[in-house]
Image: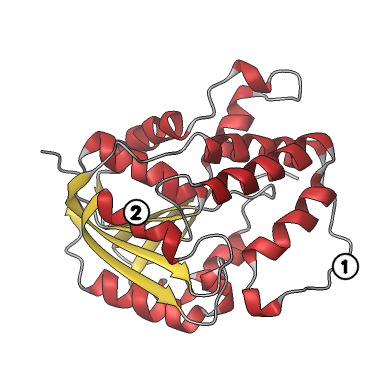
Amino acid sequence: MIRKWELRFGTGSKLILVLPRKDSSALSQKEWENMFVDFLDDYKFIVVDFPEKLMQERKVSSLNIDDFDWSVGFMADELSTLIESLGKVYCTLGISLGGMILQKYYFNSKSIIPTILISTMSEQNAKLKAVFNSWGLLANKSGLVAFKYALMPWIVNQDHLPIKMDVPDGGDEFSRIKEVISIKSVLSHDSTEGDTTLTRAAIIYGEKSPLINKSEVDSFGNHFKNITFYSVQNSGMRVLEENKSASIRFITEFLESSSGVVNEKN
């Protein structure tokens, strides 16, 4: 089966560019269309998975991972080239790792395209460093099954703990390597020195996420000056799955109040 790194859907005239969360799996057309089904008549979407794209282009194996740059900064440069080629983008949306890549893009480019950042961090703290380092070790040394067991308690609604899990799918070697690479990218991210006063940003996070909560998102105020925070009630990290109605309602309000701009830079 051919793994896709880009999806396109929607029949509207306004383009939303989406960078997904880190995920060892390939993009699923059905999953992403269902996620944004409320917007398909008014907007068109392009979803780009940069870790997947770079792995395929570089023909990566476990033997040559360290030969390449997997940093958020490198992926942001790739994103900049893509956005310039697209011409007009109404809004960008980044989830988890996708949101980190977008931050770096905005700090480097001074773009004024509105952005929505979901369940992502701006600055590393001790908790985040410890969690992602642990995940990286498990994915690298113990495989995807061990990693997925360690992942679940951090991404669910904390009220659902402790959780019972069936044995997760172990996946293939490509998927395992993708997870290792994606965690490397996350650990490379820190927005401490970055800022932009130009773009309008919405920061969305799950009220009951054990990993990305108010203490993690408050630091966005140091880097984005025109910013709105939204805490999705009764949700863990995956807000678009756990409380889709509230998440979509807020995103709709943000999109309807955005001007949608050509890729202008100061």
Coloring basis for residues: secondary structure
Q: Nearer the viewer, residue 23 or 84?
A: 23
The picture places residue 233, in percent across and down from the top left corner, at: 48, 81
Which residue is depicted at the point 51% across and 79% down?
244
**Viewer can see residue 10:** no
Left-right relation of 139 to 230: right
Between label 1 and label 2, give the one nearer the viewer. 2
The picture places residue 171, in percent across and down from the top left corner, at: 82, 48
Q: Are marks 1 and 2 in contact (CB under 8 Å)?
A: no
Q: Earlier in the sequence, mark 1 or mark 2?
A: 1
**Viewer can see residue 66:** yes
Q: In which image quadrant can residue 232 be found?
A: bottom left
Q: Residues within 10 Å of mark 2 (few under 14, many from 20)?
A: some
- Quarter holding the C terminus is top left
Provide the residue designation for mark 1: 166
Instruction: Say if 135 sits above or below 236 in the image.
Output: above
Q: Nearer the viewer, residue 96 or 52?
A: 96
Say which mark, if any, is on residue 219.
2
Residue most extreme to the top: 67
Under mark 1, the amino acid is: Asp
Left-right relation of 129 to 213: right
Q: Nearer the viewer, residue 181 or 128?
A: 128
